Amino acid sequence: MVQVRISDGILEGEVTDNKYGGKIYCFRGIPYAQPPLGDLRFKAPQPVKPWNGVRDAKKLGNECYQYNVVFSKVAKQGSEDCLYVNVFSPNLKPTKPLPVMVFIHGGGFTGGSGSDEFYGPNYLIRHDVIIVTLNYRLEILGFLCLDTEDVPGNAGMKDQVAALRWVQKNISNFGGDPNNVTIFGESAGGGSVSLHLLSPMSKGLFKRVIPQSGIATAHWATGFMVKERSLQLARELGCNSKDEKEIYEFFKALPVEALVNKHITLTYAETNKEVFIVPFSIVVEKQFGNNERFMVGEPIEILRNYGIHEGVDVMEGYTEDDGVAFLGGGKDISKMISQANKYAEFLVPQTMSIYCPLIDQMEIDMNPEIEINARLMELIDQVTKLWTNFAKYGNPTPDDSLGVIWKPYTLEGQDFLDIGENLVAGTRPDKDELEFWEQIYTKYCPKYAP
């Protein structure tokens, strides 16, 4: 057992042996906000109420209530009381504060959690970084929007912001450096990370970002007619009122079981599954008094007019055949790749440094449940070294110890690193596919053209 005092009280975690070397100081199920129950349902997260005595931090907190299709769950699960972080540190009292890597899970904004059953720290933590994972509200509970002061939308993203603020306030107690925080995520987590680069609420909460297979300008990352979907949902659940206050009270009183796995479709293409959508996701918020807004404009417009937060390093990439899951919905893989590279082009003039990886075959799971042979361990070491070097230095290859120098991406050189059986530096990834899609965008959708 091991204890740490944070701003809200004393935590008791545990020390475990990492089977890949070293020890891990584990603190699970730490509340970073009040449980969003009752009148707090759909609201921005509220500060934790401090506790007396010692709080057990050896077990995971509840995952957020969901119907988890992504991870092949067949039943509704979780709880509304789910706003917890997990901290894994290699050293609680290092001679120099350690870099911090905060992982935001994917799952289409409808499923998943920060559980170390899926996202364990075992490989990354060996490189002397602290790993933080978190839960955030999902689907309707996290992204219902009535365009009102009571339900402005983006509660799930505000949960993420609250967790990042918790890290700034408390991570030094675990040996971490609050001035060297990297946020990274995959799929919806990658989209989240990318959106944090644009949100006024997130400014100053991190130094580096790694969006993996998800970007702010992806068609699924931001919501389409979310208020209309919310009103349609109310009608389908039995509320035909046009008074937004009455609708809010109706949603607030419903049992949680009624608020998951609701795929509200509004268009012909959606109804006939011709396009992949996330029904409830991020919206542009209206201003109500002095309320904090997570998203103040369309991502593409913020990028064009204001750019991302200053002084942030970015490592933005995609995997081979990224977007293959969308093929059934009429989407082309190359379009997903094109979006990732055009997003990189938007960032080039605005970032301290940007690196673009292309990962072959599959994304490397941070804790894969597969047989680890010597060759696979070598590949894991390579990838985790690149990621943690970036977190430490803002440069994935500060020297040539990995046998390759990964140059920053520029509009002129368009350097990238192909991460496969070997690490291979190259230029102009997927050149032909990109040129094809840029011609399409320029002709039919100039708003999104580079």
Image (cartoon, rainbow, N blue to C red):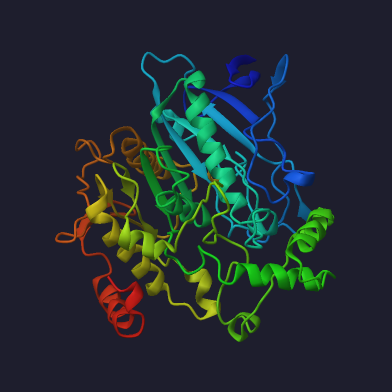
Quarter of the figure that contains the C terminus? bottom left
Q: How many marks?
A: 0
Residue placed at 64% from the left, 61% from the top?
145
Residue 58 appears left or right of 396:
right
154 or 146: nearer the eye? 146
Quarter of the figure that contains the N terminus? top right
**In the figure, 50 relative to 384: above or below?**
above
Residue placed at 53% from the left, 69% from the top?
325
Q: Quadrant of residue 99?
A: top left
Given the current orientation, which residue lies at the most extreme left position?
412
Residue placed at 67% from the left, 71% from the top?
229
301 or 96: nearer the eye? 301
Residue 51 appears left or right of 359:
right
Can the viewer see residue 89 in this picture? no
Residue placed at 29% from the left, 51% from the top?
422
Residue 300 screen position, x and y as percent: 38, 65
93 or 40: nearer the eye? 40
Residue 121 screen position, x and y as percent: 51, 35
Residue 59 screen position, x and y as percent: 70, 30
Residue 190 appears left or right of 11:
left
Residue 41 screen position, x and y as percent: 73, 48
Can the viewer see residue 211 in this picture? yes
Q: Quadrant of residue 124?
A: top left
Given the current orientation, which residue lies at the most extreme front position?
289
